[in-house]
Amino acid sequence: MKRALAGPALAILCAMLAYELGLSLLPRLIMNATMHGIVRRAGDWNSIYHAPRASASDRRMVMPSPDMLYSACPYDLKAGPLQVLAQVPLGVYWSLSAYDDENGNYYAVNDLQASGRVAFVVVPEASPTQAFEASGARVLHSPSRRGVVLLRTLSDPRENGAETLEALRRESNCRTLPAKSAGSNDAGRYNAAPSGVLRRA
Amino acid sequence: MQGLWGESRVRWLGWAMLGLVCGLGIAVGRSYWLSNFNEVSVGPWQASSSLGSRDAGRLARAGLALNGILALNRHEALYYFAESDSGGRRLSGRCAYRIEGEDPDARWWSLTVYGPDRFLVRNPQHRYSADRNSVTRRDGRRFVVRLDRDLDWVDRDWIALPAGDFFVALRLYNPADDSVNAPQTARLPEIVRERCA
């Protein structure tokens, strides 16, 4: 009798283990697949990918918003901090959001809280940030080494100005900052640019 | 003896594999279907207040990764989903609907139709969504967006439907504080079934 129940007991034990492990690993596995998908299109980590507007023929990501233009920087902080130079349009919804490697949205800022050309620097948690802050950059503390910075720009293709917004968002970019730039103005140099130069047609 | 041991080992491995597959299947299934997308209800609309949140529980986080990758946290955006009309009937492309109401209290909002595969619905006019800026308003306040397979494409306030089941996503960007703190109190439009084929 005991022998007959040993097999099912092992199966139940393994099922419980797999269930717990599955729940813990799913967010990371899915986010990893997402990040690698973006890296393939961007060409490398710490590079920006300006995705085309979502359409019905786009089957890469579920529930895309057809009203937003998405630009994404998949990052890996192994080589150094990530710098994102963003162009914030005037008068339309825009946001920059950052995600850890488990799909957690740990930072978000929108066009009501930033304007013109803005520099962001992503660093690992507990990293020194004074030098970046002194240069005018906004500093994001990433809970994980890898993640994604996503820029959203509201753009209705039926409205005037859609082409201008498309061109504008392509001026945003990201790159790995050399370690020495932490003490220079390089990290936040875009903040020196005047705001209000970006207008819809 | 060697043969018996080999046979027994295969049986143990079989039980273990069965357990692992079942456990993983239940984890994915529960995350996909039973995660807390219905923890908030407003008429036909359902929402998860933990979408995009880093404080969600393990089941919710797994479900959010499967259903809402790279979603914004609720302070930046609220996401509502409807799989049924305001009468509680499942949404179907065999019927025509109107979504009617006043603007939700948010800086910007949009309505988007998705097929059962969670992708946008193929249609020659590329009409996937309607939003705060695109809809026309009657008496300056109320809007009506029509969901139909056959409507004349020149109607601006129209979203195309698939042949089968579908669902609607309502996104509120920069929602009012009241909605952020209590998503169940948000003022959301009705989904009215008009006719069925």
Image (tube, coloured by chain):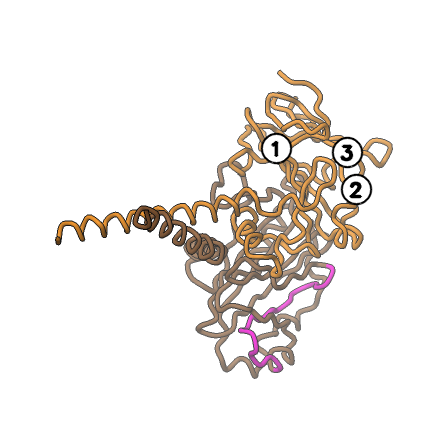
Chain colours: A brown, B orange
Q: In the rendered image, which residue does mark 3 sit on?
A: B136
Going by the numbered disc 2, the residue's amino acid type is Arg
Rounded to the nearest angstrom, the CA distance separating label 1 from label 3 is 16 Å
Q: Of callouts 2 and 1, which one flags the residue occurring earlier in the amino acid sequence?
A: 1
Label 1 crowding class (10 Å Cα cut-off): few <14, some 14-19, many 20+? many
Chain letter of the residue carrying label 1: B
Q: In the rendered image, which residue does mark 2 sit on?
A: B187
Does residue A41 appear in this view? no
> Is B18 placed left or right of A105 in the picture?
left
A158 in the magenta segment: no
Which residue is at the front of the view, A10 or B88? A10
Between disc 2 and disc 1, the foreground one is 2
> Is B161 placed left or right of A198 in the picture?
left
Does residue B39 appear in this view? yes
Disc 1 element: loop
Rounded to the nearest angstrom, the CA distance separating label 3 from label 2 is 18 Å
In the figure, A132 relative to A114: above or below? below
Disc 3 element: loop
**Which quadrant holds residue B42?**
top right
Q: In the rendered image, which residue does mark 1 sit on?
A: B127
Q: Position of residue A150 (x, y in %)?
A: 57, 57
Q: Residue at x 36, y 52 (%)?
A: A10
> Is B100 placed left or right of A32 in the picture?
right
Boundaries of the magenta span: A112-130
